[in-house]
Image (tube, grey):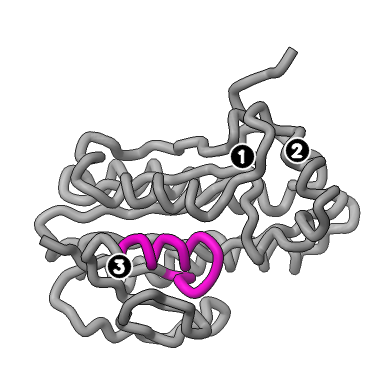
Amino acid sequence: MGKHYLIVGASSGIGLQLTNDLLEQGHQVTALSRTEGNWTKKVNFISYDINEPKPIELKTDAIDGFVYCPGSINLKPFHRLKRVDFQADLDINVLGAVEILQQVLPFLKKAEEATIVFFSTVAVGQGMGFHTSIAMAKGAVEGLTRSLAAELAPKIRVNCIAPSIVNTPLASKLLSTPEKIEASAKRHPLASVGTPKDIAGMTSFLLSDQSQWITGQVLHIDGGLSSVKMM
């Protein structure tokens, strides 16, 4: 029997791939995004800009899962970062998720079982130059994940995926040429950059009943970057 998932940022990149995967699996999706996406089947589309929060009206009694996909890649030397840069990354990556989740949490609680998935970055645990602002914001996402997993157990599971660079529109400036893609791939033990399918596949697993005994985890889907050192 199909489930009903709420995907924020469903029109592009990982969110688009995930939405289409869930639709093909026979699930129902409510999509929150600024614009409509190239979805393979009909979704319940709600126009929403995370920079302009507003009340959300869901046409359902319950939702089985919530995924927050919006993110940012703000890479600058620390001395060039302003307060507005840190605030923007926090707003997009953390506070936007909190504002929406607080609205829809009653719908998750009405489901028999529900699951929440956030996204972090390999840079939180790895330590990378020029990543101060985004790593700080995503570090807050990881803290949010573990705290909510404790607070919402046992009925709602909460997990987080921490990818390395993924070939999406968000990373287009970093992967804009074959040479840049090759250089990025060489930094990973598996000699490739991630694809939306890689991350969407793990997200689908975390949403499914196959992951019923997993909560409070930050899963590194990063081509081995965080744990494997090549000789």
For residue 73, which quarter of the picture? bottom right
Q: Amino acid at mark 2?
A: Met
Residue 223 horizontal/vertical position (percent): 59, 34
216 is higher (above) or lower (below) than 137: above
- The span shown in magenta is 8-23
Q: Which residue is mark 1?
A: 122
As helix, strand or loop, the secondary structure at mark 2 comes to loop
Q: Which residue is mark 2?
A: 128
- Dots 2, 1 in contact, CB < 8 A: yes
Mark sitting on residue 213: none
Q: Which residue is mark 3?
A: 23
Q: Is residue 31 left or right of residue 187?
A: left
Q: Which numbered disc flags the more N-terminal residue, 2 or 1?
A: 1
Residue 119 horizontal/vertical position (percent): 50, 52
Residue 231 horizontal/vertical position (percent): 74, 12
Q: Amino acid at mark 1?
A: Val
Q: Which numbered disc flags the more N-terminal residue, 3 or 1?
A: 3
- Dots 3, 2 in contact, CB < 8 A: no
Q: Which numbered disc flags the more N-terminal residue, 3 or 2?
A: 3
Density class for disc 1 (Cα within 10 Å; few <14, some 14-19, many ≥20) is many
Observer-nearest of 231 and 148: 231
Q: CA distance from mark 3 to mark 2?
A: 36 Å
Residue plotted at (47% across, 84% down): 36
Please name the predominant secondary structure of the magenta segment in the image: helix
Q: CA distance from mark 2 to mark 1?
A: 9 Å
Residue plotted at (78% across, 62% down): 173
Q: Amino acid at mark 3?
A: Leu
Residue 135 horizontal/vertical position (percent): 66, 47
